[in-house]
Image: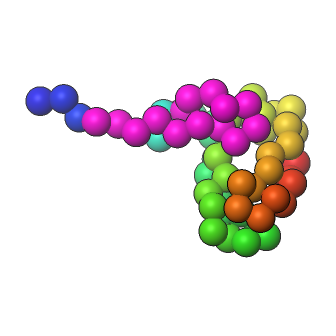
Amino acid sequence: MSENIRMQRCNPCQVAIMPSQHGTTRFPCPSCGMIPIIRCERCRKFGNRYTCPNCGFNGP
C-alpha cells in the first residue's frame, strides 16, 4: 500500500520539503498567524527573506 505524502514548499525559495526533513522549520506568520511559514535549512542559514501570502509580512 502506498502512502500519499504531501510535499510542502519553502516560502522563500519554493524548494520541495519532506515533512520530516532535517533543518527545516514551520511556524505561523508572526503578523497574522493565519498562514504557516515554511523555511528550508539553506534559507534559514542564509537568512533569506519570506513573505506571508495572506498579509504581506516580510521576515528574515
Instruction: Say which quarter of the image contains residue 52.
Output: bottom right
**In the image, residue 47 lies at what x, y percent?**
87, 39
* Most distant residue in the left direction: 1
**In the image, residue 54 lies at what x, y percent?**
70, 61
Segment colored magenta? 4-17
Residue 31 is left or right of residue 60, and the answer is left
Looking at the rendered structure, the number of numbered marks drawn on it comes to 0
Instruction: Say which quarter of the image contains residue 55.
Output: bottom right
Q: Residue at x 47, y 40 (%)?
A: 19
Instruction: Say which quarter of the image contains residue 5.
Output: top left
Residue 2 is left or right of residue 48, and the answer is left
Residue 46 is left or right of residue 11, and the answer is right
Q: How is the image coloured?
A: rainbow
Query: Would residue 47 be counted in the magenta stretch?
Result: no
Q: Residue at x 28, y 36 (%)?
A: 4
**In the image, residue 33 lies at what x, y percent?**
67, 70
Residue 17 is left or right of residue 5, and the answer is right
Q: Give the prevailing secondary structure in the magenta stretch.
A: loop
Q: Residue at x 85, y 37 (%)?
A: 48
Q: Residue at x 19, y 29 (%)?
A: 2
**Of 19 and 15, the residue lying toward us:** 15
Residue 20 visible (yes or no)? no
Query: Would residue 15 be counted in the magenta stretch?
Result: yes
**In the image, residue 12 lies at what x, y percent?**
76, 38
Question: In the rendered image, which quarter contains the N terminus?
Answer: top left
The relative height of residue 25 versus residue 43 in the rendered view (above or below) is below
Residue 33 visible (yes or no)? yes
**Of 27 and 6, the residue lying toward us:** 6
